[in-house]
């Protein structure tokens, strides 16, 4: 990076969703004003985040330090190319989710809408804090904020199933963070005297002379400790969280929670350990093969699930590991492919969950086997689903094709023939569990009830966001340079 500049906009970006949460609580008795406050906070956050783009692309690292506890130990924020990829996707998609959530919650007359919107804003507060964290301490604190603030969202229905899903969710995430990340963070500080992320992906922050076994143990703690990344066997919280309302599932699986986990993982891989150290200790390719188990295993499980949201949940478990796999290849093209999937997956996966919610609102159907013929009654919804499914499969011209292409080239550059096999096999599995949903929808024989009383499309507040995210998935496939330029800047 050319310059390091203090910038108050980082603090304002983090505070925008926090202020939005406060306004939502203050206006809870007036639903229209409450949703307007959420929208205002989302627009403000995206505007501030977008204003950082020119400086970051010009090679500047923007920082804002709130306070310093000890030398090398501070609570500080930073905007660099990696943080911008996550922050831009999350802040923009929050805008669309505000509209979608309002339509969903009102259509089903859900209770606790003020609590829902408040916790939603607080979760984005934690996610943006993670995106802009300048060091491992700040990242850890915001990571825990995301865990705590999304617990009420998972338990929203306040029934036995909701509380069980929320209990599993919070137990997995807080136990792994405190049991693995916290002690690793303490030892990293003792060894290196700092928790600040390196400005380049190559050197890392660990000094020479540290025993290789210690480094490997710290690395394993960090990979498994950020359990929001969905790596097996610490993935069970994620399907269990599907008891939440669909806007929450969209938030969990596309924007905030899982992306916080995978972002934190790759941030530590690249800016704590660094490419050079990982290559010297041969940590990269073994990591790629390790997460390949998740990619293939979760896809096979998805094939067996009839519940649409559960199938999408296991798809998320699988797709997240593409990001880690790409970075673990330690080749420039592989890293770029993994990082750009942060955005590509976000836009496509949120579309799929938006569609699942729209189908439920319109027909009250959750299982794929019950959706035969619904595509003819809901062509916009199922058309958007088909587009997003093509992205998850990796077919052109949708965003996921760019990811698969870069990962394939990265695997070739690394000489990892086994990873090539994994990518091809996973693509076939992706097609196997997505194509039947689209086929049933458009070509299946509807039930007698649906034939006589076909459902209509969901309200426009839900339909427009899902069509926009589907269109943007295509746009990111046809014009991938916007997010790719950030990914390429990371590996320089």
Image: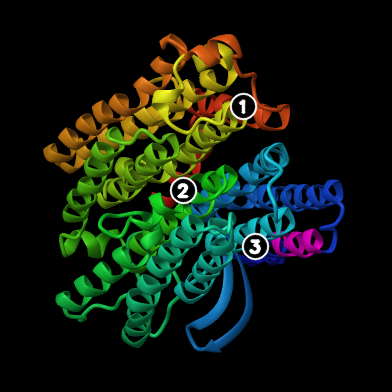
Q: Is residue 155 above or below residue 486?
A: below
Would you say the residues marked 3 and 2 are in contact, meaning their CB atoms lie under 8 Å apart?
Answer: no
Q: Give the mark nearest the N terminus, 1 or 2.
A: 2
Q: Which residues are magenta?
A: 16-25
Residue 126, position in %: x, y?
58, 64
Front residue (pair 148, 333): 148
Q: Which residue is mark 1?
A: 362
CA neighbours of label 2 inside 10 A, class few (<14), some (14 to 19), many (20+):
many
User: Callout 3: 10 Å neighbours few (<14), some, many (20+)?
Assistant: many
Horizontally, is 247 left or right of 117 in the view?
Answer: left
Q: Is 459 situated above or below 87?
A: above
Classify 371 as above or below 86.
above
Camera-nearest label, 3 or 1: 1
Residue annotated with mark 2: 242
| As drawn, 145 above or below 66 | above
The residue indicated by pointer 3 is 122
Work out which residue is located at the far bottom of the displayed protein and give it.
70
- Tell me residue 222's x, y (percent): 32, 68
Magenta stretch secondary structure, dominant? helix
Q: Residue at x 18, y 34 (%)?
A: 420
Residue 492 visible somewhere in the drawing: no
Q: Nearer the viewer, mark 3 or mark 2?
A: 2
Q: Earlier in the sequence, mark 3 or mark 1?
A: 3
Mark 3 or mark 2: whose residue is earlier in sequence: 3
Would residue 312 appear left or right of 107 to someone viewing this image?
Answer: left
Q: Secondary structure at mark 2?
A: helix
The residues bearing labels 3 and 2 have C-alpha atoms spaced at a distance of 20 Å
Task: Name the residue rendered at 37%, 34% in the picture.
Answer: 403
């Amino acid at each position: 990076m050319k310059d390091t500049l203090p910038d108050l906009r980082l603090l304002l970006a983090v505070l925008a969703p926090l202020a939005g949460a406060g306004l939502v609580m203050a206006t809870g008795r007036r639903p229209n004003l409450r949703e307007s406050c959420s929208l205002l906070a989302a627009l403000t956050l995206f505007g501030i985040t977008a204003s950082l783009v020119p400086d970051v692309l010009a090679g500047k690292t923007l920082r804002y330090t709130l306070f310093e506890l000890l030398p090398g130990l501070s609570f500080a924020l930073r905007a660099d190319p990696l943080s911008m990829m996550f922050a831009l996707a999350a802040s923009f998609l929050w805008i669309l989710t505000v509209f979608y959530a309002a339509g969903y919650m009102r259509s089903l007359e859900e209770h606790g809408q003020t609590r829902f919107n408040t916790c939603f804003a607080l979760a984005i507060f934690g996610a943006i804090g993670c995106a802009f964290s300048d060091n491992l301490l700040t990242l850890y604190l915001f990571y825990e904020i995301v865990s705590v603030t999304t617990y009420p969202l998972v338990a929203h229905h306040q029934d036995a199933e909701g509380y069980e899903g929320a209990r599993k969710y919070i137990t997995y995430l807080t136990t792994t963070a405190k049991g693995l990340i916290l002690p690793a963070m303490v030892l990293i500080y003792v060894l290196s005297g700092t928790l600040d992320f390196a400005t380049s992906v190559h050197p890392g922050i660990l000094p020479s002379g540290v025993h290789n076994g210690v480094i490997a143990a710290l690395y394993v703690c960090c990979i498994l400790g950020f359990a929001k990344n969905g790596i097996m066997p610490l993935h069970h919280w994620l399907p269990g969280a599907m008891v939440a309302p669909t806007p929450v599932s969209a938030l969990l699986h596309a924007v905030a929670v899982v992306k916080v986990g995978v972002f934190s993982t790759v941030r530590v891989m690249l800016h704590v350990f660094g490419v050079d150290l990982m290559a010297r200790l041969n940590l990269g390719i073994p990591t790629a093969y390790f997460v390949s188990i998740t990619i293939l295993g979760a896809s096979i499980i998805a094939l067996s699930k009839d519940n649409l949201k559960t199938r999408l949940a296991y798809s998320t478990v699988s797709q997240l590991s593409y990001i880690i796999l790409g970075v673990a290849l330690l080749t420039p093209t592989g890293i770029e492919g993994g990082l750009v999937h942060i955005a590509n997956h976000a836009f496509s996966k949120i579309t799929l969950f938006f569609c699942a919610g729209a189908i439920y609102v319109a027909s009250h159907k959750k299982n794929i086997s019950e959706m035969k013929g619904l595509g003819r009654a809901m062509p916009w919804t199922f058309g958007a689903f088909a587009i997003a499914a093509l992205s998850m499969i990796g077919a052109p011209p949708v965003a996921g094709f760019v990811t698969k292409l870069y990962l394939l080239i990265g695997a070739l550059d690394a000489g990892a023939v086994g990873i090539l096999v994994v990518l091809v096999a996973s693509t076939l599995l992706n097609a196997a569990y997505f194509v039947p949903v689209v086929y049933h929808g458009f070509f299946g024989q509807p039930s007698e009830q649906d034939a006589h009383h076909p459902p209509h499309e969901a309200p426009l507040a839900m339909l427009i966001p899902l069509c926009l995210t589907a269109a943007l998935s295509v746009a990111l496939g046809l014009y991938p340079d916007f997010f790719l330029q950030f990914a390429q800047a990371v590996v320089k």
